Image (tube, grey):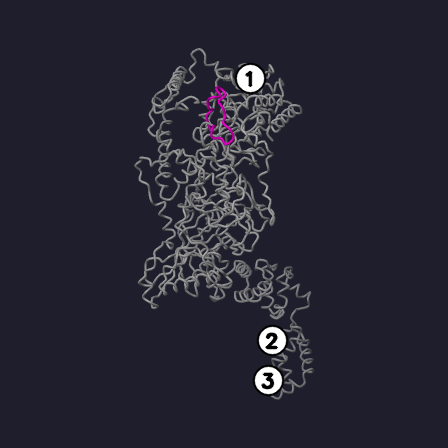
Amino acid sequence: MQAGLHNGLRSGSLRGLAFKAARCKHTAVSAAKSSVIRDIHDKITSKECTAVEVTQRYLDAISKTDPKICSFITVDADQALSQARAIDAQIATQGTEGIKVLSGVPLAIKDNICTQGTRTTAGSQILRDYVPTFDATAVSRLRAAGAVFLGKTNMDEFGMGSSTENSSYKATRNPWDPDRVPGGSSGGSAAAVAARECAAALGSDTGGSIRQPAHFCGIVGLKPTYGRVSRYGLISYASSLDVIGPMAHTVEDAALLLNAIAGADAHDATSSGQPTVDFAAGLLPAASLQGGSRPLAGRRIGLVVETLGEGVAPEIDAAIRAAAEHLESLGAVVEEVSMLTFSLGLPAYYVLALSEASSNLSRYDGVRYGVRTAGAADLPSMFCGSRGEGLGGEVKRRILMGTYALSAGYYDAYYKRAQQVRTLAQREMNFALASFDALLTPTAPSPAYR
Amino acid sequence: MQSSAWAASAPASRCAALLQPLPHKLAPKPFTAVSNMYHFNPLTTVAPAPGAAAAMCSSLGSDTSLFMRPLPLSAASSPALWGQRVVCRSAATVAPPTQTAASAGTEVEYEAIIGIECHVQLLTRTKAFCSCPSEFGSQPNSNVCPVCLGHPGTLPVLNAEMVTLAVRAGLALGSEIARISKFDRKQYFYPDLPKGYQISQYDEPICTGGRLEVEVDGQLKSFGIIRAHLEEDAGKIVYAGADRLSGADYSLVDFNRAGVPLLEIVSAPDMRSGRDAAAYGEELRRVLRTCGVTDGNMAEGSMRVDVNVSVRPRGSTVFGTRVEIKNMNSFSNMQKAIDFEIDRQVSLLRAGRGSDIVQETRLWDEIKLVTNTMRKKEGLADYRYFPEPDLPPLNVSDEFIEQVKASMPELPAAKRARYLSLGLTRGDVAVLTDEIATSQLFDAVLALGTAVKPAANWIQGDIMAYCKEAKIGMDALAITPATLAEMVSLIENGTISGKIAKDILPDLLQGKGNKGVRAYIEKQGLLMISDEAAIGAMVDKVLEANQKQLQEFRAGKTKLQGYFEGQVMKESKGRVNPGLMKEILLRKLNGE
């Protein structure tokens, strides 16, 4: 498991994936220690195995594991194998010279990220038959980098939820313990990575939707800075907060994915024009940290006190403090910092996210695509019928609240006030980051719950 | 599409349903009459459902947690945002007309208050937020893409050309150009609105203020502009199964127009009559066409006007109830519609039925020449405007504005002043500046040294008549300014007669003289005959053939001279030098 390709290519067995429902508590799921992506890359370029073999192993793993975990809404085996064959053909004709680090690496894509020719539902019945005619920019960049797409992962409908129980298709289970939730809304991607049904995955994060499921499933998840990754092709929940990001086994894998997807995009006016860097360049191998090495000397890290203490599970509190100590042992100075706007963040987030969502989801009206109710007698019943049938309860609740917050007479009290809070929080965050290199907080107040 | 090993064994029946073949969702749904249109069926209610009506659908769960409470922050919220709208539409403010005035009888004099909202389609090559062509008249749903169809995941990207044209319009109207403006979402449900909201500008438009000087029946008037803002157009609904909305079986939507860039120009409520409004509209169109902002084609909908009309007793300072009129496809119709509406409202007030004037939208019926209720407004529509999060604020630099300023053409008012200074009459100036192509040809001919008077006469006389007859614009003529200038100079120097010029003008207008008018005339054998002997021979022939009239002339009926002149002209097929011919004819008539 630890050595070699993590789902057992060398031995031909599916070690680590071969848990059964009865056994899978406390058993074979374990975290990878070294880059899975580099491992696959090495095996393909050394011709130890073909890209088709790699992809087939993951497809086999999905067949075997996913009936239990339910990470995927759509698996597109034909497409994945044909992408893998293209890599093998390239190696056969041109050698391994042009093989990039993601060439032939099987990935899973959250189902709110558009994939040309492959159904994209955002976890909603209203898009149950929707097949995009274009790739999201993040997807087209991965495609250009040679990545293989296994399929589309389950999620809370339109990203609205944090357990993946709000998917209109099925509930995803936590591979470490099927009785627990995988988190959400990118729960399908997190579980697929943790269950080794893919080498890594794309998720999206509006208010924790990458970070929290990554935490619940014991993988690495990163919400990049807003604008770092193009949103073009990401089905909008809250436009001013939505970000696509990597979910992977290791920090290095996340960095390699981010390298491929980051950067300005002419299709997204809110994407950042700042040049990107090689996010994997500064990483040190864990082995180099032995023997009193202090690579973090001179770094200051702030431990946000509002995120610890009351309401936080003791094991979470302990883990964060242990992490702080570990960072100190590597040379960093860790200091407690208080951020007064912290408690205001959540209510402000909900007002803004729901306001934007109420607008973004107006397009699902049954006119051009998506579900249209049968036999409506007039226009209002067509709109209401299609949306009533196609959208789930949580989505409707959030649309209602967002619609209310933007209504005449309430705009100032809710939307505008929330924007003011956002400005304050931004200022405080910038202020804190002026004196600290990084801030340390738990991802969530508890581990994965049942 | 899906591999099925896992899914086939999925316990939930919903999962199994997913394995059905997926229809290709971009393909239009099947229907009968017109191909390539999105259809819905049937349609009985057309009023947009503003607000949450359509958003709030049935079957909510019970767990409605309340996230939103006003936050205990001290910063006072400013009412300016919402207040501004009322200021912008001051003509619209509802205040019932004073009943005392109405009941006082017929001696009360009323005045009308008229404001105009004008949507012009900007002359960009592509749409406002995607790269689809912005052209009119294509096959339904052929100029569309995922962005302008509002597909999931798509984002708008601002067309820079649209900003340039808005700045041009603002400069031409004397508006303040905002260095920073922003886009907002105007939200309502309607089948022709792909995203469920229109990207527009609400409280920070690109142009604010401005003025348009207009001559109305010889009197110079100045009408204020409140603002001009950028927005995108919606698609077009076609009612099928009947020739009008009522009775239609179903409706089809063509999204070619969805996302086409518009500039909405809102006037101050400064107009007092249909004539004022029409003059404002005509001048606005002329100015914007001159700047290349729009083609202003009202028939194709690239210029659409909505007018707000209210009346009040003269001297009153409050506004009467505003009525909006739509569906006017020409300025003369607009004038008639407004005058009808003023009469209607004044009659109601005089009859003591002022309360029958309600805030509503009325449609102009150009056959019956009346306005009819289209929809009553039940309270103010709540469009839930909020800042468009997909587009950053729009920054327009001083440098950019200077660049646009430097590229501005001469505006109609300046052109009129220049023509007047050339000694042309107001009437001539009005005709020559009405259409851009006319003044362009005129200026080009003047630039070649042609005298003002003949140039003006030819252009607004025979050439304009030709264009009217052929139903073409002056810019569609093949003649070059040089050809026209040469023709005028050939008349002036006696090479051809005015009569010949009139005869050959249609050929010249079709470009047949563009290689040199003189060469063309020689080839046609139309040079003026100035040879005395030749003229003398023609005169002799005419006198010979008209002995009776010659006797009468010599007996004293000298007014027959004109008759003889006509006969000689006819004999020469119009080519004879008129001065010389008259001289020789008179000599011979008198028997000299």
Answer yes or no: do the residues labelled 1 and 3 have beta carbons within 8 Å? Answer: no
Answer yes or no: do the residues labelled 1 and 2 have beta carbons within 8 Å? Answer: no
In front: B374, or A276? B374
Q: How many marks?
A: 3
Residue B183 vertical placement versus B355 (above, below): above
Range drawn in magenta? A164-184
In front: B556, or A62? A62
SS for dot 1: loop
In front: A49, or A252? A49
* Magenta segment includes A178: yes
SS for dot 3: helix
Task: Provide the chain ID for the residue under circle 2.
Answer: B
Look at the image and tell me whether residue B156 can be seen: no
Q: Position of residue B155 (x, y in %)?
A: 50, 38
Apparent side of residue B318 relative to residue A177 in the rendered image (left or right): left
SS for dot 2: helix
Judging by the rendered image, the residue that carries numbered circle 1 is: A18
Q: Position of residue A207 (x, y in %)?
A: 43, 30
Judging by the rendered image, the residue that carries numbered circle 2 is: B579
Task: Provide the chain ID for the residue under circle 3.
Answer: B
Hey, what amino acid is under mark 2? Gly
Q: Position of residue A330 (x, y in %)?
A: 41, 16
Callout 3 and callout 2 share a chain: yes
Secondary structure mostly seen in magenta is loop
Residue A327 vertical placement versus B48 (above, below): above
Q: Residues within 10 Å of mark 1 (few under 14, many from 20)?
A: some
Q: Which numbered mark, 1 or 3, is in the foreground of this view? A: 1
Q: Which numbered mark, 1 or 2, is in the foreground of this view? A: 1
Judging by the rendered image, the residue that carries numbered circle 3 is: B558
Residue farthest toward the top in the current orientation of the protein: A291
Q: Quadrant of the C terminus of chain B?
A: bottom right
Hey, what amino acid is under mark 3? Thr
